[in-house]
Image: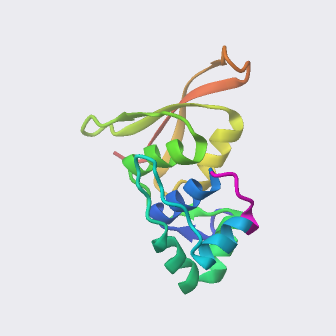
Amino acid sequence: MSATSQTKLSQWDALLVESLRSLGWTNEELIARVRSGQLPVDESPFQFKYEALSAFAAEEPQTFETAVKQGYQIKYNTVRGIHSWIRVALGLEPELLLEAGAEAVRVSLTADEKARLASVLSFGWRIREEETGASEESGAERGVYLIEPIQR
């Protein structure tokens, strides 16, 4: 699916989907549980309330199902939202840089993680490589990237 035709989700709905996906559910199970309202209580620091996702799935069932099965692009990202998405979806601890005029997120990513992040970022953001190297713990090639606004 091209970026121009990709299903769009709000940043919050994307976080809710990724939080549920992190439970190891299949796409079909995630869709069925959200539609039926059989959802867990979130014990994470985010304290997600999944009822909002159930309401969205009821209002826009095709959009919800397509986003879960085929992917999505976030309608509008914020620097804190990108930071949260990386934590929830990729299970990483990115660095949040909040210096005025230089807001960004710094994180070490594999090529697959970078591609996944790039596929969901809203218009107006870029991923800029700072350095590349092999990770000592996994041996996987990782790069350190800044996710930042295209214009400052």
Residue at x 58% of width, y 48% of height: 89
Q: Main secondary structure of the magenta part?
A: loop
Viewer-nearest residue: 19 or 44:
44
Image quadrant where one finds the C terminus? top left
Residue at x 54% of width, y 53% of height: 121
Furthest residue toward top = 136
- Point out residue 82 in the picture as x, y percentages from the top left corner: 46, 48
Image quadrant where one finds the N terminus? bottom right
Task: Please determine whether, in this image, residue 140 is positioned above or below residue 58.
Answer: above
Task: Please determine whether, in this image, residue 34 is positioned above or below residue 19.
Answer: below
Furthest residue toward left = 100
Viewer-nearest residue: 111 or 23:
23
Q: Is residue 89 visible?
A: yes
Q: Is residue 25 magenta?
A: yes
What is the span of residues highlighted in magenta in the rendered image? 23-28
- Quadrant location of residue 20? bottom right
- Point out residue 13 in the picture as x, y percentages from the top left corner: 50, 65
- Point out residue 77 in the picture as x, y percentages from the top left corner: 44, 56
Residue at x 56% of width, y 69% of height: 8
Instruction: Report the label total.
Output: 0
